[in-house]
Image (cartoon, coloured by chain):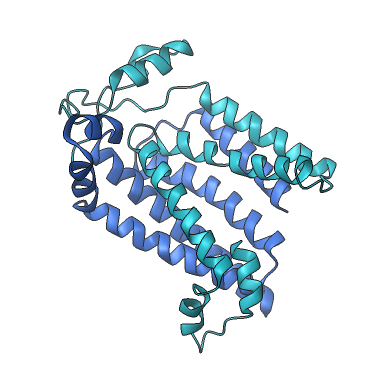
Amino acid sequence: MLSHGMKQTGNISLHHLQGVILAVRNPWVAVGIVLLLAFFASYMNSLSWADLTYVLPATSLGYVLLALVARFALHEQVSPLRWLGIALISGGVGFVAGGPALTAHEHPHEGSSPFDSAPGRLAGKNASHGAPAEEVISGGVQP
Amino acid sequence: MKSAYTWGGILIVVFASVVGDILLARAMKQVGDVHALWRRAGLWRVVSRILGNPNFFLGVTAMAVAFFSLLFALSWGDVSLVAPAAASLTFIGNAFAAKIFLHEKVDRRRGIAAVLVAAGVALLAG
């Protein structure tokens, strides 16, 4: 959507920076921004209980979903290279999902606040993959 | 010349994205589990705690820089180059930055995953 909207808007010159702001008035760009905000809220929630290097690969499943929609809903042609890309992303996400969600740090009591992360969720996730219990901590890092 | 502009834009997108991701991840670790916090103290407490975190604002600022740089890069170069290059390099950059600045345990499993995902994104979006 953003790409489509920006192609409609045309090239933006460094001498006319207000063109970037005006681009937001394009409906395609506006809808793209709303969807990005929804993504952002989900992303922040995930980062509150899992490592960045755990969450980030999972977000790439969006590319896989997009390719599958293009193939089966829009009946577009998906080349063998793109199928290979889907396989690599799926393999990468499966790889990282098999490990612990959160890195253990040296001060396990730092996150003893009642407002910190849910130990049951992390411990359960960890136990289901058979990783050692000390790989996860039960709380977030305090400011 | 247009190619230089495009790659310059891509590098700015990658740098700003990595900085934004690191700052946001640090902010959310400082806030704690949003789900648990919401359940115990309500939505307002979640919102005030996130908005009161300086790393959150710095991260959002970096993300805004990345977003507008992406718009510039998309207006200069083809989406088939800009999108996969920026996304792939961001995955690799984040793996290094998370290990250095967030002290995350980027072991062989996560390292391989970052490379696989970056390669997959490059193939898929290219």
Is A107 placed above or below A47 here?
Answer: above
In the rendered image, the residue lying farthest to the bottom is: A15
Residue B1, picture quadrant: bottom right
Q: Is residue B109 left or right of residue A38?
A: right
Residue depicted at 38% across the width and 61% down the height:
B62
Residue B4 visible in this rendered orientation of the protein:
no
Residue A5, picture quadrant: bottom right
Residue depicted at 51% across the width and 69% down the height:
B69
Instruction: Please provide percent x and percent y for residue A59.
Output: 53, 41
Residue B126, picture quadrant: bottom right
Q: Is residue B31 left or right of residue A121?
A: left
Instruction: Please provide percent x and percent y for residue B23.
Output: 33, 51
Residue depicted at 27% across the width and 28% down the height:
A117
Picture colour for chain A: cyan
Q: Is residue B80 left or right of residue B93?
A: right
Is B74 placed above or below A76 here?
Answer: below
Instruction: Please provide percent x and percent y for residue A94.
Output: 59, 26
Residue A77 visible in this rendered orientation of the protein:
yes
Question: Of B93 and B63, which appears nearest the observer?
Answer: B63
Question: In this figure, what is the number of numbered marks?
Answer: 0
Residue depicted at 27% across the width and 53% down the height:
B55
Is A58 placed above or below A126 here?
Answer: below
Q: Which chain is blue?
A: B
